[in-house]
Image: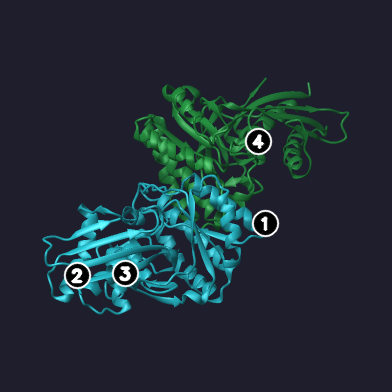
Chain colours: A cyan, B green
Amino acid sequence: MNSATAVSPANIAFIKFWGKTDSNQNIPYNDSMSMNLSGCLTTTTVEFDPRLDDDRIVINKFEASGSGKQRVVRILDIVRREAGMGLKAKVESANNFPTASGIASSAAAFSALAMAASTAAGLTLSKRELSRLARLGSGSACRSIFDGFVYWKGGKDDRTSYAYQLAPVTHWDLWDIVAVVAKESKKASSTQGHSVATSSPYFRQRQRGLPLRIKQMKEAMLKKDFPKFGRLLEEEAVDLHVMAMTSRPPIFYWNSGTMEVMKKIREWREEGKEAYFTMDAGANVHVICRAKDEAEINQRLGRIAGIESTIVNKPGRGTWLI
Amino acid sequence: MNSATAVSPANIAFIKFWGKTDSNQNIPYNDSMSMNLSGCLTTTTVEFDPRLDDDRIVINKFEASGSGKQRVVRILDIVRREAGMGLKAKVESANNFPTASGIASSAAAFSALAMAASTAAGLTLSKRELSRLARLGSGSACRSIFDGFVYWKGGKDDRTSYAYQLAPVTHWDLWDIVAVVAKESKKASSTQGHSVATSSPYFRQRQRGLPLRIKQMKEAMLKKDFPKFGRLLEEEAVDLHVMAMTSRPPIFYWNSGTMEVMKKIREWREEGKEAYFTMDAGANVHVICRAKDEAEINQRLGRIAGIESTIVNKPGRGTWLI
């Protein structure tokens, strides 16, 4: 048994990961918070095979090469070293949602990879160890390992930077309707964004303000205070894009569809239909609402011209083996 | 002769006026820079008339009342006091461009009013005095008094806060094509925006950075270094909206059309067609280009679905009497 298959969710950050103190180990400037997305999944199979001369990485049916392949091989190498073996692997990975468009596809991918590769190699890692391993592939992947609502303690090095669960899937009936306004890959990757994050004249001030916002959001989340949670959520979402738009060179992720959805959500709130927006580093809008309003809001989103499709998510479980 | 008619241009701010140290006298936190717009004009007639019991203010054919009227009456009162007379006035004012939609209609209106009212009252004010009088009606109106490219020295009180000319109309063949993406009045007035400006956590950092940006932009403008000028122009435009979106409560002026035009302009630059964007506190985009590219860019703008119309402007002369 040199093979394992893992499924893992993307996650939506309520508090964003933006800027790294160590870009090799993916150590963030700040702690972050997220919810796993039940409907945005990556399935990854890793098989170590003595017949292979080289690692083969197939992502969404395409053979990866270059830096895309190297990011995966790095994780395989760590697993091989840990397991004391040298077999090459075939990795097959597929998303059920559009890649590189503001849905954290790399989070789902590297958390699934961490679990599938370590299991296939015969390792038994704790969830914290899995979280750290996933983080080395893509920072926010460390948050996808745990069920439900998750906190990433940024830490200061590889040992101290890992995620843990804040609340289980059943804690709060928050739904995330992803309004897909851009299926194409975005122009600037998150990696590029991170690399220029500190060039924003506002980055330091953001860091100063974050501990209070994190504390307040954690409280609002645990108390299920939706209006307070939503206000902080939108402030943080705008803040991420403020950092991007004021970095040198500036990065613009929003498009016309993004603006339209943001505007509608504010209008709907004025009418008493409560939903809030957030976005990761991309154009798609994550519309956060209560379960009771999901059908109505999804229907309204469907009537907005710029929206290509929606993906409805409940709080999702973390990475699992199948 | 108790009557006078003045025509005055709107202006587009290259460095923005955002936040007031004195909201009664309209003293700004920072200096600003602008160009007058040849195609966005207000024509205002003031007639002091012994038969009137009260001031009558007619703006775009509608009789003004309440706070809109009060802002005009305040200027008339200053003029009457200065001229030592007490006659009531009829004021008739009309724009040739949409009101309150990101084109600085109040700048054109109050500069025209300052000149028409003071002339009708028999006063002979210097341009600096006119600039200060216009400023009391609407801050940025002080910049519309002078021909071409204008600088507003923010100052610290009524006496020291006034505009002056940086360069004449003929200095540079910069054109401003206003892409009108929103003809409706905006939800938050500039006045509201100013009142919450300092609540942005980034306002102080903006103030710290402005002197260098202003210095660089003034240099780029005087040397006609378009790429450098354009980069600074866009940074400043984004900065204004960053302040608005991060104030408490946040203000969002951009709409889907705004985003679409910004994106196109960046794409056109990549193709070698050089234009830059800026916006005031509104959704409309001011597309700044060289005279030689105006026809092509205006045509391209016309093909963008979200654009209702365009207004083509050269550097405009300041307020004049007709």
A311 versus A76 height, above or below: above
Q: Which mark is residue B99?
A: 4
Left or right position of A134 against B213 = left
Q: CA distance from mark 1 to mark 3?
A: 43 Å
Question: Nearer the N terminus, badge 2 or badge 1?
Answer: 2
Instruction: Give the amino acid type for the residue marked by disc 4 in the picture.
Output: Thr
On the image, the x and y values in percent for residue A78 come to 19, 70
Q: Tell me whether the residue at label 2 lies in contact with that at label 4, contact meaning CB atoms closer than 8 angstroms.
A: no
Judged by depth in the image, the label closer to the viewer, 1 or 4, is 1
**Amino acid type for the residue under numbered disc 1:** Glu
- Report which residue position mark 2 lands on: A78
Work out whether disc 1 and disc 3 sit on a shared chain: yes
Mark 2 or mark 3: which is in front?
A: 3
On whether disc 2 and disc 1 are found on a single subunit, the reply is yes
Count of numbered circles on the image: 4
Q: Is residue B173 visible?
A: no
Q: Position of residue B183 (x, y in %)?
A: 62, 37
Mark 2 vs mark 4: in front: 2
The mark found on residue A271 in the picture is 1
Against B30, residue B59 (above or below) is above
**Helix, strand or loop status at disc 4:** loop
Q: Residues within 10 Å of mark 1 (few under 14, many from 20)?
A: few
Instruction: Confirm whether circles 3 and 4 share one chain.
Output: no
| Dot 2: chain letter | A
CB under 8 Å between discs 2 and 1: no
> Could you say where residue A152 lies in the image, as x and y percent from the top left?
38, 71
Callout 1: SS: loop
